[in-house]
Image: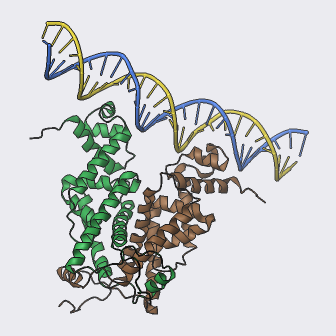
Chain colours: A brown, B green, C blue, D yellow
Amino acid sequence: MDITPPAEERILQAALRRFAVDGLGAPLRAVAQDAGVSAGLIIHHYGSRAQLLEACDQRALEVTRDSKQEVFSGGAGVMLAQLAEAERYAPVVGYVLRRLQDGGPLAIQLVEDFAAHAVEYFAQGEEAGVINPSRDPVARARVLTEMALGALLLQLPAQRDQLDLEELPAWLRGYTDALLVPLLELYTVPLLTDSSMLDAYLAARPDADRTTPTTDGKTP
Amino acid sequence: MDITPPAEERILQAALRRFAVDGLGAPLRAVAQDAGVSAGLIIHHYGSRAQLLEACDQRALEVTRDSKQEVFSGGAGVMLAQLAEAERYAPVVGYVLRRLQDGGPLAIQLVEDFAAHAVEYFAQGEEAGVINPSRDPVARARVLTEMALGALLLQLPAQRDQLDLEELPAWLRGYTDALLVPLLELYTVPLLTDSSMLDAYLAARPDADRTTPTTDGKTP
DNA sequence: ACTACGGCTGAACGGGTGTTCAATAGGCTA
DNA sequence: TAGCCTATTGAACACCCGTTCAGCCGTAGT
């Protein structure tokens, strides 16, 4: 029943897994050993280490894009947690975290993706009447996405230098669970008691109001 | 006028700077060259590369602890931005970012520190009547801190693989400025239109209520 | 059956790393 | 002055890394 995939695919999966566990700095030879091939073969198929990472990036992007049915505004973090539940995808989720940690074009791309999706998602919620409108929906979605993703990223150091993919789903679930109540509270009852701070800051810089331009006489 | 500090201190400053610019993986020899000494001397003074990093950690911790006068609930991110304004501290701020990125005990320690300070800060605000109370102030402070710090961390990849310490203050300021309006809005008008989500989730798990224990008949 | 070819290997190369160590220079003490 | 301790160096060592390359092997084509 265990038909082994062709070497090229086996390498990519091993790479995803190993990079997730040990970080993107993991040596090629470790990947090779995991895939049961020689280091040379990786180069033969992918050209170079950098290109192997690119292949991993693309795979990660595909997987995350194919699973953009979030649950609620817990946002990107929750989505990743859900995705990891399907243990088949745990390596990809781990890799995504590592990639966000390490930077590179994909990191930006991913955040962009998630943020764009959040915009759409919030717009739906707004129409349904469960989410309050914003003076700048795009900025709001971006901030919330970056915060959710960033907070998740900040949990990474708490793990050992090695990520345990077996426990990753449980760990992510535990984290999102702990996060959820304070977050929901924050989304329900505002942090600040009145709008004086916002008003003051808005009055101090009468610059951008891209959605509703020109005249608004809201400053008291 | 340019009295050069003793070599040991010069090494530490060079290390802070170089690690901030190139990441914690920067070679010892690069640090040595910046400090105008040989690589061997670094080992002679600090024992090993790992211990040099520990020394950097301790220095960073001291500096951040000595400057914990935040302005408002923009939180840790804003504080770091302010600290970087004093260009003298830019290397330390850069190092802190790199360290948060890389993990390790200090990363946890720093978050802990910031979160603890946020608790205190929020409590003051609550007493002053500008901040709404929370059912779990510690959790709230932690979440907000992790989010602010994490979001900042997520901006790092957007920079090149090298951090430009000259531009770091301006960059941080630009980021916090862009962040501020959406964030203030989020803190003023809640994301969700009603408390149904929070209520539902709270009803589903009648577990922790650490601050006000025993009986509270708040679930409708 | 012979050839050609693509997947694949293992050894080797070249570069970069942290660390060691013998040796030097310089200032303090006796 | 003689001795000694510390700061400092530069070369060397041992290791790990990505990449190269010559060659092996099995299979498909003729």
Q: Position of residue C24 (x, y in %)?
A: 26, 17
Q: Residue furthest front?
A: B214
The quarter holding residue B171 reads: bottom left
Identified at 23% across, 60% down, the residue is: B169
Instruction: Give the camera-side residue of B218 and B136.
Output: B218
Q: Report the quarter where the N terminus of chain B lies.
A: top left
Q: Which residue is located at x 37 percent, y 55 percent?
A: B107
Instruction: Tell me if residue A152 comes above or below residue D26 in the rendering.
Output: below
Q: Nearer the viewer, residue B7 or A162?
A: A162
Q: Position of residue C16 (x, y in %)?
A: 42, 38
Residue A155 in the image: above or below residue A43? below
Q: How many marks?
A: 0
Kindly identify the residue that appears in the image at 46 percent across and 67 percent down.
A109
Residue B209 higher or lower than B168, as above or below: below
**Side of B11 where B150 appears, left or right:** right
User: Where is residue A169 shown, x and y percent of the image?
Assistant: 56, 65
Give the quarter of the figure containing the C terminus of chain B.
bottom left
Residue A34 higher or lower than A185, as above or below:
above
Tell me if I can see residue B98 in this picture: yes
Task: Determine whether, in the image, residue A102 is placed left or right of residue A58.
Answer: left
Query: At which x and y percent is residue A41?
Result: 64, 46
The answer to which image quadrant residue B37 occupies is: top left
In front: A120, or D1? Answer: D1
Q: Picture quarter containing residue B188?
A: bottom left
